[in-house]
Amino acid sequence: MGAIERGTVALIGVRRGDERRSADRLLERLLAYRIFPDEAGRMNVSLREAGGGLLLVPQFTLAADTHKGTRAGFSAAAAPEEARALFAYLVEQAHAGHEPVAAGEFGAEMQVELVNDGPVTFWLEARADCG
């Protein structure tokens, strides 16, 4: 469905209230966040600077409320139609501003494989009302 070589795999959860400005902000953060090593081995190079690929994977379970009980609640997740449209917008904007870009299919059961190059995983939030 979608594959990249060296780059960033971004699992994308869409919550109620997210909008295009949120997607634009998230994309800018994904492309500019300094997570790749420089010559000294420090995380100081962005995906954009490294020329790496961006794989966007829709993952509605990221919007789950897990703070109590033993079963996740999904009331914070955007309605499927809204989330699908916003994810499609994010993919479209990513293609317009960076290459290579690949994406998973919204609503599909996917098997995602990745090789994590070091112990680096970040949770990026980019709500329009956040900086």
Image: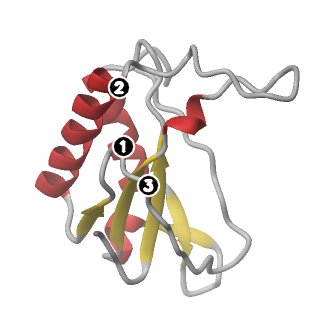
Q: Quadrant of residue 2?
A: bottom left
* Label drawn at residue 109: 3
Amino acid under disc 1: Gly
Which of these two is toward me, 64 or 98? 64
In percent of width and height, residue 11 lies at: 49, 51
Whole-percent x, y for residue 75 in the image:
57, 14
Task: Measure the alpha-carbon separation of dots 1 and 2.
Answer: 8 Å
Q: CA distance from mark 1 to mark 3?
A: 7 Å
Q: Which numbered disc flags the more N-terminal residue, 2 or 3?
A: 2
Amino acid marked by disc 3:
Glu
Question: Camera-side residue: 76 or 127?
Answer: 76
| Mark closest to the chain's N terminus, 1 or 2 | 2
The image quarter containing residue 63 is: top right
Residue picked out by circle 1: 107
Q: Residue at x 61, y 69 (%)?
A: 43
Find out whether the residues at labels 1 and 2 contact each other: C-beta distance under 8 Å: yes
86 to the left or right of 129? left
Label 1 with label 3: CB-CB less than 8 Å: no
Mark seen at residue 80: 2
* Picture disc at residue 41: none
> Front-most of 74 and 28?
74
Q: Residues within 10 Å of mark 2 (few under 14, many from 20)?
A: few
Placement of 105 over or under 59, stated as above or below: below
Q: Residues within 10 Å of mark 3 (few under 14, many from 20)?
A: few
- Quadrant in which the N terminus is drawn: bottom left
Farthest residue, direction left? 96
Mark 1 residue element: loop
Identified at 58% across, 80% down, the residue is 115
Residue placed farthest to the bottom in the image? 39
